């Protein structure tokens, strides 16, 4: 079982920056950040949108809307996953979830239904 715990969410103004952190019980699998937009809570896991993922080999992948603004990274010595977010926009608002799975495909393909392990989420609110 992989245990994940996010922190770092906050309310910021557009253009601001935040760094999300995820403490993981193990950090040797593909991992990523997904977000759930406001108003979609009842849709469950399937509505979580992949934002940034990083493979076991360190290869990173981002959705187009965050390229150049967000950076995903990991620290193997601390079992930590990070998401640095710069130039935040109101459309970045949502609950951000840390995700992991021993089978990399759901993470690398940003397919939330196939992801086995999630954190509890951390709220990011960006005001205009």
Image: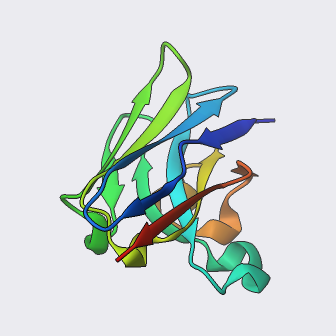
- What x and y, as percent, mark residue 94? 55, 70
Q: Is 26 above or below relative to 60?
A: above
In the rendered image, which quarter contains the C terminus?
bottom left
Q: Is 21 above or below relative to 44?
A: above
Q: Name the side, left or right, on which 83 lies relative to 80.
A: left
- What x and y, as percent, mark residue 91? 40, 78
- What x and y, as percent, mark residue 56? 45, 36
Residue 29 picture quarter = top right
Which scheme is used to colour this image of the protein?
A: rainbow
Q: Name the side, left or right, on which 120 lies relative to 88.
A: right
The residue depicted at 66 percent of the width and 86 percent of the height is: 39
- What x and y, as percent, mark residue 31? 53, 45
The residue depicted at 60 percent of the width and 49 percent of the height is: 98
In the rendered image, which quarter contains the N terminus?
top right
Residue 19 picture quarter = top left
The residue depicted at 40 percent of the width and 56 percent of the height is: 52
Q: Name the side, left or right, on which 89 lies relative to 45.
A: left
Q: Is 109 above or below relative to 82?
A: below
């Amino acid at each position: 079982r992989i245990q994940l715990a996010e922190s770092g969410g906050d309310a910021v103004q557009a253009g601001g920056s935040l760094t999300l952190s995820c403490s993981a019980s193990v950090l040797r699998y593909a991992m990523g950040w997904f977000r759930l937009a406001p108003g979609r809570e009842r849709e469950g896991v399937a509505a979580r949108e992949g934002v940034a993922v990083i493979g076991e080999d360190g290869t990173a992948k981002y959705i187009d809307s965050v390229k150049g603004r967000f950076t995903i990274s990991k620290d193997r010595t601390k079992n930590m996953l990070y998401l640095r977010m710069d130039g935040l926009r109101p459309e970045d608002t949502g609950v951000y979830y840390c995700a992991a799975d021993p089978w990399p495909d759901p993470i690398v393909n940003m397919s939330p239904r196939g992801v086995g392990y999630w954190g509890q989420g951390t709220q990011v609110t960006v005001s205009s």
